[in-house]
Structure formats: C-alpha cells, structure tokens
Image (cartoon, helix red, strand yellow):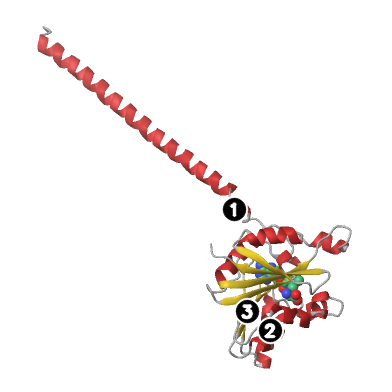
C-alpha cells in the first residue's frame, strides 16, 4: 500500500489528539486530587484549631468524679450532712439570707440546691409573686424537693433537674443566681457560667459562696476536695461576663462573692 501525504497527516493528527486527551485526563485527575488534598488539609486545620480553643478544652471535666458521691443519693443521709450544726453555711444560714438581700416578687435560682436548705428559706422571702428555681443535677435531690413542694403547697418553687453543663433556665428568667458550696462541684464551670449568664436578667447578680482554700489554714479535706482558690474562682467567673461587686464578710471558712452580669 502506498503511503500518501493525507494518510501521514491523519496519523499525526490522531497521535496529537490522543496525547491531548491523555494530558487533559492527567491534569483533571491531578486537579481533583489536589482539591481533595486541600480540602482534607483544610478540615484537618479546622479540627486542630477547634480542639485547641478553650471551648473544647472544657468539653472535658475539670474535676471528673466530684459528683460521684451523689449517685443514687440517699436523701435522708444528705440532709444529715448538709443540714447539721457545725456546717458553717447551715449555722449561719439566716445571716446568709439577710446578706443575699431578697425582695418580694424576685425570681431567684438556687443552683446546686441539694436538700433544699436555701430553697426553703428563699421561698417565703420572695413571696407568692416571686419564684425560686431549685436546680440540681441529682435526681434524688430534685425529686425530694418536689415532694416537699407538693406536701407544703410551696407554689412559688419550681424544681429543675439540669445537666452538668447547663443550668437549663430560660433566657433572662432570673434576677439572682445563688451558688452555695456548689461551684467546686461544677465539672464544666465555663459552660455552667455561660448558661447562668444567659438566664440572668440585665445587671442580674450571681452570688458564689464556697470554701476558702488557703494552704496551712484550710483543712486537709478542703485542700484535697476543693479545686480552685478564691482568686482563681474570681478570674474564671469574670472571664465569662461577670464583674465582682462585693465580697461580704459574713463567713469564716467560706467566702461570699457577689458578681454582676456584664453585657458582652
Ligand atoms: C455540696 S452540695 C451543696 C448543696 C446546697 N447548695 C447546700 O449548700 O446545702 C453540691 C450540690 O451541687 C450539685 N451539683 C453539682 N454540679 C452541679 C451542676 N453543674 N448544676 C447544678 N447542681 C450541681 C450536687 O448534686 C449537689 O447537690
């Protein structure tokens, strides 16, 4: 067969076409791979950034197991612990009540209500137009406060079983959040504080009573059980949109701090 010029031209064109298509395919595959690679790298970077933020840091408990003792709580046993003479906040509960400064008609949350020691004192102080939210993560405590409420017709008390990260109160529902001997039980203090901030009305107050932790002064039990000292607690709370406005001198083994909500 005689090879003509058009045949050669046709062959050359064919080869060029195959090479062009092959190049196109390679470049397409490479681009797709690069895009997937960049995407994977972006996802990895975002995950890394998120995992390094303080938010994620507090997805882990700051004090694992601190509330383990309340699992299947025997209510009568804990009444004997929380409401016994010799416990400072029990002995001075009426002084504490005066210093809290409740008025009739106020909405207040007793966060970490326990056996309801302060809930029961707050109820008559805010009166029938007021409201006391008894908030606790422990089922048995909440159920027993609920029983007291029903038996005594304390209609201005509402019980809430919250989660360790959220006080579960509606936005702007309270003027005062009261946290007695409970801050050191918060496993997720930053998230609890954020939810308290959310629940407080404008310029609402947060009162925190907790054990002073002073080496050489505080008991061995306090030194081992209580996570943070007064200064660290103030720093943690102020970092979440609160400002310390008072430090009341009504207790000895405990401090009594008053914060106001600051708009963020
Ligand atoms: C030492 S008791 C204090 C009870 C009460 N405030 C008093 O002084 O008698 C601590 C309470 O905090 C509760 N608690 C722990 N973490 C909590 C959280 N994140 N939110 C609400 N309650 C919590 C426990 O279930 C327990 O009832």
Tag in front: 3 or 1? 3
Q: What element carries label 1?
A: helix
Location of mark 2 (residue): 122
Give the camera-side residue of 29 and 125: 125
Relative to the observer, which residue lies in front, 140 or 111? Answer: 111
Does 186 sit above or below residue 127?
Answer: above
Using the image, determine if residue 135 lies above or below residue 54.
below
Task: Work out whether mark 3 precedes mark 1 in sequence or the reverse, and give the earlier one.
Answer: 1
Q: Nearer the N terminus, badge 3 or badge 2?
A: 3
Q: Residue at x 32, y 31 (%)?
A: 28
> Quadrant of residue 135 in the image?
bottom right
Give how far apart the Cα atoms at labels 3 and 1 are: 30 Å
Relative to 45, is 169 above or below? Answer: below
Quadrant of the frame with the N terminus? top left
> Measured from the top left, where is residue 13 in percent x and y?
18, 18
Mark nearest the camera among 2 and 1 is 2
- The reply to whether discs 3 and 2 touch (Cβ–Cβ < 8 Å) is yes
Residue 108 - label? 3
Picture residue at 29% right of the left edge, 24% below the top: 22
Is residue 194 visible to us here? yes
Q: Which residue is drawn at 67% across and 75% down?
A: 139
Q: Which residue position holds label 1?
A: 56
User: Residue 140 location in percent, x, y?
Assistant: 70, 77
Dot placed on the residue nearer the N-terminal end, 2 or 1: 1
Left or right placement of residue 216 versus residue 185 in this view:
right
Q: At numbered mark 2, what does the secondary structure look like: helix, strand or loop?
A: helix
Question: Residue 113, position in %: x, y?
Answer: 70, 76
């Amino acid at each position: 067969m005689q090879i003509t010029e058009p045949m050669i031209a046709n062959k050359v064109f064919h080869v060029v076409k195959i090479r062009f298509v092959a190049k196109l395919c390679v470049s397409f595959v490479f681009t797709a791979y690069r895009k997937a690679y960049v995407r994977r790298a972006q996802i990895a970077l975002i995950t890394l950034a998120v995992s390094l933020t303080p938010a994620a840091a507090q997805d882990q408990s700051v004090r694992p197991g601190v509330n383990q003792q309340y699992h299947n709580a025997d209510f009568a046993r804990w009444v004997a612990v929380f409401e016994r003479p010799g416990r400072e906040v029990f002995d001075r509960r009426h002084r504490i009540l005066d210093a809290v400064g409740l008025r009739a008609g106020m909405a207040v949350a007793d966060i970490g209500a326990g056996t309801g020691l302060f809930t029961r004192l707050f109820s008559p102080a805010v009166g029938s137009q007021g409201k006391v939210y008894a908030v606790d993560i422990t089922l048995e405590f909440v159920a027993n406060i609920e029983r007291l409420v029903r038996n005594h017709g304390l209609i201005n008390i509402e019980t809430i079983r919250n989660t360790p990260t959220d006080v579960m109160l509606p936005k702007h529902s309270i003027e005062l959040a009261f946290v007695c001997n409970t801050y050191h039980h918060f496993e997720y203090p930053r998230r609890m504080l954020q939810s308290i901030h959310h629940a407080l009305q404008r310029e609402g107050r947060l009162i925190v009573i907790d054990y002073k932790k002073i080496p050489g002064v505080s008991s061995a039990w306090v030194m081992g059980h209580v996570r943070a000292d007064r200064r660290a607690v103030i720093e943690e709370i102020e970092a979440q949109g609160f400002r310390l406005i008072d430090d009341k001198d009504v207790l000895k083994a405990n401090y009594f701090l008053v914060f106001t909500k600051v708009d963020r």
